[in-house]
Image (cartoon, grey):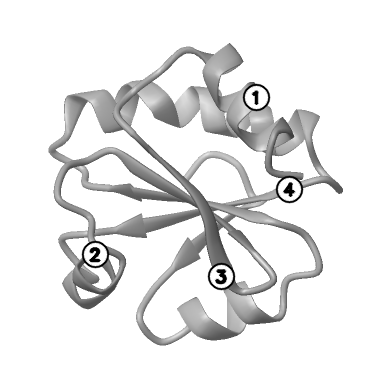
Amino acid sequence: MANDKIVELTTENFDSEIQNSEQPVLVDFWAEWCGPCRMVGPILDEIADEMEGKVRIAKVNVDHNQELAIKYGVQGIPAFALFKNGEVADRMVGAAPKANFESFIERNL
């Protein structure tokens, strides 16, 4: 990952990172082989910088953490879940322009 503000989540740290976050967390369920996932990466890097203090950005590689993908009902990637107070507040599926991510986050803050 290019941005040190983006947290890599695994089955081992997922619950602690989500539950202990004072900010909402946008989780990107992705895979290395997924073209649309790679297209979204730079957008999330920008959002992590621009919205620091408002929202945390995290990524789950579904190939390495299939249990999390199953637990959160991920059927297609990229898929995004916004967690507030440890619970899923909203979901979004598919690659989208930066403005879509910004409005998705803003309406859930």
- Tag 1 or tag 4, which sits nearer the N-term? 4
- Tag 2 or tag 3, which sits nearer the N-term? 2
- Answer yes or no: do the residues labelled 3 and 1 have beta carbons within 8 Å? no
Q: Identify the secondary structure beneath mark 1.
A: helix
- Is 33 positioned to the left or the right of 106 in the image? left
- Tag 4 or tag 2, which sits nearer the N-term? 4
Residue count near mark 1 (Cα–Cα under 10 Å), binned few <14, some 14–19, many ≥20: some
**Camera-nearest label, 3 or 4:** 3
Q: Give the percent coordinates (x, y) of residue 97.
A: 47, 12
- Is 99 positioned to the left or the right of 13 in the image? right
**For mark 2, what is the residue?**
69
Residue count near mark 2 (Cα–Cα under 10 Å), binned few <14, some 14–19, many ≥20: many
**For mark 4, what is the residue?**
55
Q: Is residue 24 above or below residue 13?
A: above
Q: Give the percent coordinates (x, y) of residue 43.
A: 53, 23
Residue count near mark 3 (Cα–Cα under 10 Å), binned few <14, some 14–19, many ≥20: few
Q: CA distance from mark 3 to mark 4?
A: 14 Å
Amino acid beneath label 3: Glu
Residue 80 has which mark? none
Residue 102 has which mark? 1
Residue 87 has which mark? 3
